[in-house]
Image (cartoon, helix red, strand yellow):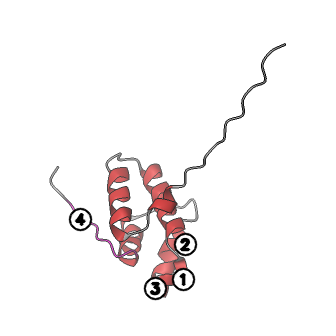
Amino acid sequence: MTPAKKKTARLEFEMANYLDSPQAVADYLNIVMEENDSEAFAEAMRTVLRAVELGKLKTEHRQSLETLQTSKPLNFWDISKIFRALGLRVMAQVG
């Protein structure tokens, strides 16, 4: 008789649960942007949206935020508006 397989519990990790401050959001997005992967960045932005409540954001930014929920590519202006809505800035830095 073979021994019964042990069931292991799976814990689901949701990054959005840890984005509880503007600094946490900024750190997370900076790490993702270092990858230079536009799809990873779009997914990170969607994760940030799950972490914040859309209702708390200004009405004029909602359209830009809703762009993330589609498969439409993000452009600089959408990203800039979303960052402003989140209280963040887009800036260049010497590497």
Q: Residue furthest top?
A: 1
Q: Which mark is residue 55?
A: 1
Q: Nearer the viewer, mark 1 or mark 4?
A: 1
Q: Measure the alpha-carbon separation of dots 3 and 1.
A: 8 Å
Q: Nearer the viewer, mark 2 or mark 3?
A: 3
Q: Earlier in the sequence, mark 2 or mark 4?
A: 2
Q: Measure the alpha-carbon separation of dots 1 and 2.
A: 12 Å
7 or 16: nearer the eye?
7
- What amino acid type should be assigned to the residue bearing mark 1? Gly
Q: Disc 3 designates what residue? A: 58
Q: Mark 3 Cα within 10 Å, few/some/many (few <14, many 20+)?
A: few
The secondary element bearing badge 4 is classed as loop
The secondary element bearing badge 1 is classed as helix
- What amino acid type should be assigned to the residue bearing mark 3? Lys
Q: Mark 1 Cα within 10 Å, few/some/many (few <14, many 20+)?
A: few
Span colored in magenta: 86-92
